[in-house]
Amino acid sequence: MQNLHLLTLLFYISFLQFLVSSWSQNQQQYYYNQEKNYEGSSDLIDLKYHMGPVLASPINIYIIWYGKWNPTHQSTIRDFMDSFSSQAPHPSVADWWRTVMLYTDQTGSNITNTIMLSGEFSDHKYSQGRYLTRLSMQYIIKNAVTSSYRRPLPLNYHSGLYLVLTSSDVQVQEFCRAVCGFHYFTFPSIVGVTMPYAWVGYSGRQCPGMCAYPFAWPKYSGMKPPPGTNDIMGAPNGDAGIDGMISVIAHEMAEVSSNPLSNAWYAGDDPTAPNEIADLCLGVYGSGGGGGYTGVVYKDSKGNGFNLNGVRGRKFLAQWVWNPVRRRCFGPNALD
């Protein structure tokens, strides 16, 4: 969705204590002793196609690293992006993307299965400052494709998807209050062409309990975290902010591919505030998920939670998306 609504998480908080207390440490997976709720399946979900394009051509990802970034964190995100079109043990990131690929345009063409990390740009000088508005993202992209002080990114309006990632010391309008990320399209008056982009911020310092769920404890929950920790699930790549970012990136990737110009796949009557294919499954990571608990996910040898395998032995946790065939939230780690 253009706004990844955090307020939805408020509904979940009353259930978080139950989530923690029911964690099983002796199983290959986390099981929560709660009645299965069919992962949001409902005949009331009115997801419709509005005749606009989807990203059916191979997607070239261009990452803009805005601010000062930890190289280890950058490596984790690169490996996630490389996992979309690469082989890895099931359930993999590529398996997860197959649900997104079920969506088609008016010609019957499916969303592509080819996603390539085709370029990167470091905006470590904070070209638009350290407090950004939504519109700032387009000027950041403009700077990246017109830069004279370093090699610019190509202006690829045929198959480019620009991903603006902001570092921990950058504040963004509504970040940590109403959004963790959003997607939209550029204006010709600013960038020169219309093309899709997404923004996601690193929340590890500013609001891990909001945007790095379920790896950090929401301070506003009114409940105490487990003794000796502020975490509720171990982060598989060692950093709650980055592992939380991975799921938000997946969320935005799914939605910008299925609704790049705000006129393709979404539920609701307002294209400026649509419920898109990932919004319908917010907080669901495994079978039985919903209502404030993640569902059934795996744990690695250190007890960290994950539901997807990636390249170079990486493990990730990404939320599920709406499957238009099954008419419910779904991911490759589903038990049924």
Image (spheres, rainbow, N blue to C red):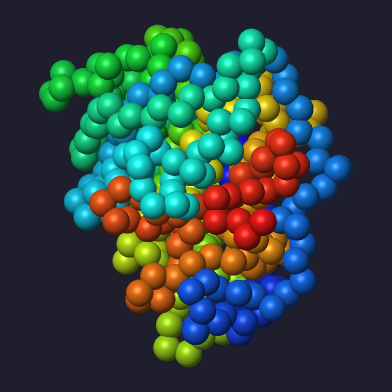
Q: Where does the N terminus fall, quadrant-wise? A: top right
Asked whether 57 or 221 is in front, the reply is 57
Q: Quadrant of residue 266?
A: top right
Residue at the image position 32 percent from the left and 14 percent from the top: 155
Asked whether 265 or 312 is in front, the reply is 312
Q: Position of residue 32 (x, y in %)?
A: 64, 75
Q: Where does the C terminus fall, quadrant-wise? A: bottom right
* 320 left or right of 247 in image: right
Asked whether 239 or 150 is in front, the reply is 239
Residue at the image position 16 percent from the left and 18 percent from the top: 148
Q: Is residue 75 above or below residue 243?
A: above
* 267 left or right of 115 in image: right
Q: Position of residue 256 (x, y in %)?
A: 53, 30
Q: Is residue 87 above or below residue 148?
A: below
Q: Quadrant of residue 138?
A: top left
Residue at the image position 52 percent from the left and 72 percent from the top: 29
Q: Quadrant of residue 244?
A: bottom left
* 260 left or right of 245 in image: right
Evaluate whether residue 171 shows in this view.
no
Evaluate whether residue 106 shows in this view.
yes
Asked whether 149 or 224 is in front, the reply is 224
| Outermost residue, left side | 149
